[in-house]
Amino acid sequence: MLLMLTACRGGLETDSSVYQMSPMETFQSEITPILKTAINKQFPNNDNAFDAFDEQAVCYYEDEDENNPKMVFLVYKEDTKEMIEIRKELEEKFGKKVVFKKAKYKPKFIRDMATEISVYLFSIRNKNNTNINSAHWNAKEEVIEIEGKLSNDQINDLNNKFDPKMLKFINNELHPAAF
């Protein structure tokens, strides 16, 4: 638990206040170690169990209802022994706080595609002095978001080079970060 002291009128208060975790932070602190254990248990002979997990699924936290956070699993292969066991263990311990959905794409594939798109964007940004800031994977929507000021030609080029069903363009003017 994090202890936070607050300053008051130039000095420290004599009573320290304890940081109160949000429902999401509390949920994350409860589920994360259990998830790590479940993944390591299901992939014991793998140097990196999380890479093996990524071949089959990805997870993210959802807090649409602030007081009822959930962990959502997008599972590409729902019927593997590992995913059946991970699902069983998490549902037993967390009930409806874990949600399993069928993924459209293999998580590793779309993550690798995001990396490939980032490399491509970097090359055209340097060549054309283009204002494209980022490409990243949005697991919740299962798309690769490309953000920047893009021309119609650039959007068409990206749609022709990569699967347009996997791309989401956030077309806006970017501003350099302030330091």
Image (tube, grey):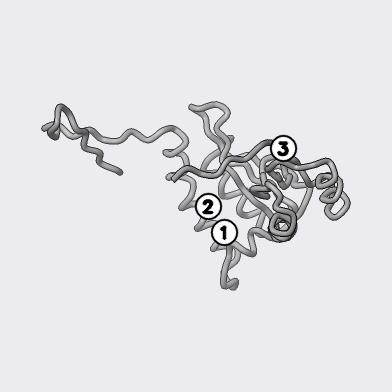
Which residue lies at the image location 47% right of the left edge and 42% below the top edge?
Answer: 178
Marks 1 & 2, CB-CB < 8 Å contact: yes
How far apart are labels 1 and 2 at the CA level? 6 Å
Marks 2 & 3, CB-CB < 8 Å contact: no
Q: Nearer the viewer, residue 76 or 84?
A: 76
Local secondary structure at mark 3 = strand
Q: Quadrant of the N terminus?
A: top left
| Residue under pointer 3 | 171
Which residue lies at the image location 67% right of the left edge and 44% below the top edge?
Answer: 138
| Residue under pointer 1 | 39
Number of numbered discs on residues: 3
Q: Is residue 168 above or below residue 157?
A: above
* Foreground tag (3 vs 1): 3
How far apart are labels 2 and 3 at the CA level? 36 Å
Neighbour tally class for label 3: few under 14, some 14-19, many 20 plus, Cα within 10 Å: some
Which residue lies at the image location 74% right of the left edge and 54% below the top edge?
Answer: 128
Residue type marked 1: Ile
| Residue under pointer 2 | 35
Q: Residue 11 placed where, x, y %?
A: 12, 33
How far apart are labels 3 and 1 at the CA level? 38 Å
